Image (cartoon, rainbow, N blue to C red):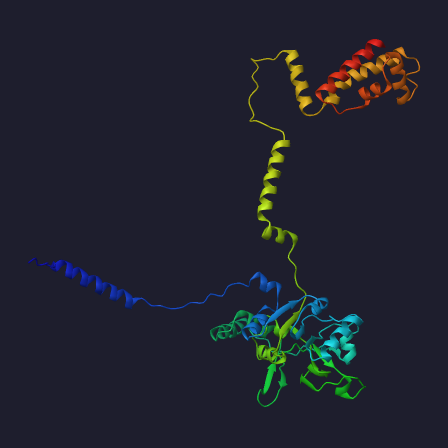
């Protein structure tokens, strides 16, 4: 019977490893750290991206619509949010929106326009936009040290630099939006430079449509609601409360959720920033760009002159005069300079024709060609071709030289 003996050193080593592991495990501190990254390109292009994500997480389907022309293509639309002002500018668009409201549609409309004269929907319901100027209130001057202390205090409280900057750059007057007892009142920070006006509120006129609900701050009305047929129209003065910069403030996100119908698709009508042609090509046709770049590089390599490294001139080696002329001729021929090579021979023939043909110097070019053809007994087309054509191949170049020599001998 074999007995397995365990070495005491092995046991001690195992116990030491277990103790070291236990010590390391309990000495390590585990924690989570969240890093704030920069905004994505999609967030920069779509200022309402945070609102869309919020609605999607609230189990409401969201879609982007870039114009009213596409409204007929969409189905199951529950709420239509006009994020840009002055979207309804033609009678056909006005009738389209009013018909959609009449059958039970829900519209959130932006009225923060500089002038409401070109917005047919605002004119139809009698809403006007008024811009207000506020005189700057006198404020006590604070020292730079006090300003930094206040800034550091708000940072310690957990506020971001963007939030502190917004609080320092503008004063906020909150608008109370009242609902029923089950919901209560909401606090909304509308920009106060723009307020809404309606004849029904101050009994200054009559309008076919009268608001049944409106919400205001000390500066004026910022939201109105109208019942049009079976639908609901909500007019707001400031859609910026639902941008990614401000939707997290106060009760802005909750108000957007309450104003949506909760049924169907939430359609956001906004100006969509289109991708440039270069962006589309780089995203979908990268291989085509690489192939085009390689072809361009090959073409440049083919057409450019070849230059070697600079070498000192070797005076001990000379070239014969005939070899020099031959090299120059080959160089000009390869650079498509055949007309330059044949020009001296043409000039010599014309000078000889001037001396031998009395009428030649006073005649025009066409008559000169006729005189040369008659004297050399050559067809007129052949004479024109040897004097006027500069597109040469090896065969036509040799033929032209021979014909010029023949004409010179005949003259």
Task: Name the quadrant containing residue 92.
Answer: bottom right
Horizontal side, residue 110 vs residue 30: left or right: right
Name the outermost residue toward the bottom. 181
Quarter of the image with the C terminus in it: top right
Horizontal side, residue 270 vs residue 49: left or right: right
Residue 177: x, y in percent?
63, 84
* Residue at (53% x, 69% y) in the render: 161
Residue 206: x, y in percent?
81, 86
Residue 73: x, y in percent?
69, 67
Q: Is residue 16 visible?
A: yes
Q: Is residue 245 visible?
A: no
> As rendered, which of 350 and 134 lies closer to the eye?
350
Quarter of the image with the N terminus in it: bottom left
Where 74 falls versus 351 (above or below)?
below
* Residue at (66% x, 21% y) in the render: 331
Residue 286: x, y in percent?
58, 48
> As rendered, which of 166 and 267 lies closer to the eye?
267
Task: Name the quadrant containing residue 190.
Answer: bottom right
């Amino acid at each position: 019977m074999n007995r397995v003996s365990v070495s005491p050193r092995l046991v001690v080593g195992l116990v030491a490893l277990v103790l070291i592991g236990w010590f390391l495990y309990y000495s390590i501190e585990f924690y989570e750290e969240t890093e704030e990254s920069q905004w994505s390109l999609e967030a920069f292009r779509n200022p309402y991206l945070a609102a869309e994500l919020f609605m999607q997480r609230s189990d409401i389907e969201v879609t982007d619509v870039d114009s009213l022309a596409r409204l007929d293509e969409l189905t199951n639309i529950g709420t239509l949010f006009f994020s840009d002002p002055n979207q309804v500018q033609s009678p056909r668009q006005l009738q389209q929106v009013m018909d959609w409201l009449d059958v039970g549609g829900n519209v959130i409309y932006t009225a923060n326009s500089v002038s409401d004269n070109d917005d047919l929907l605002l004119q139809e319901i009698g809403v006007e936009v008024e811009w207000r100027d506020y005189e700057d209130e006198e404020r006590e001057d604070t020292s730079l040290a006090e300003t930094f202390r206040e800034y550091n205090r708000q940072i310690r409280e957990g506020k971001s630099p963007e939030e502190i900057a917004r609080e320092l750059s503008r004063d906020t007057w909150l608008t109370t939006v009242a609902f029923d007892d089950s919901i209560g009142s909401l606090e909304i920070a509308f920009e106060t430079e723009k307020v809404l006006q309606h004849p029904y509120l101050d009994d200054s006129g009559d309008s076919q449509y009268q608001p049944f609900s409106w919400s205001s701050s000390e500066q004026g009305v910022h939201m109105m609601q109208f019942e049009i047929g079976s639908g609901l129209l909500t007019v707001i003065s400031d859609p910026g409360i639902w941008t990614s910069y401000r939707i997290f403030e106060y009760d802005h996100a909750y108000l957007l959720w309450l104003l949506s119908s909760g049924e169907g698709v939430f359609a956001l009508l906004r100006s969509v920033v289109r991708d440039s042609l270069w962006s589309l090509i780089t995203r979908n046709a990268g291989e085509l760009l690489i192939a085009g770049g390689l072809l361009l590089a090959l073409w440049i390599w083919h057409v450019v002159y070849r230059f070697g490294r600079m070498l000192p001139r070797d005076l001990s080696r000379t070239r014969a005069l005939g070899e020099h002329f031959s090299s120059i001729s080959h160089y000009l021929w390869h650079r498509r300079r055949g007309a330059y090579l044949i020009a001296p021979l043409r000039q010599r023939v014309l000078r000889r024709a001037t001396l031998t043909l009395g009428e030649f110097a006073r005649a025009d070019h066409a008559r000169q060609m006729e005189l040369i053809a008659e004297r050399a007994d050559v067809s007129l087309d052949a004479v024109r071709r040897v004097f006027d054509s500069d597109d040469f191949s090896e065969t036509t170049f040799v033929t032209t030289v021979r014909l010029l020599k023949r004409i010179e001998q005949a003259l």
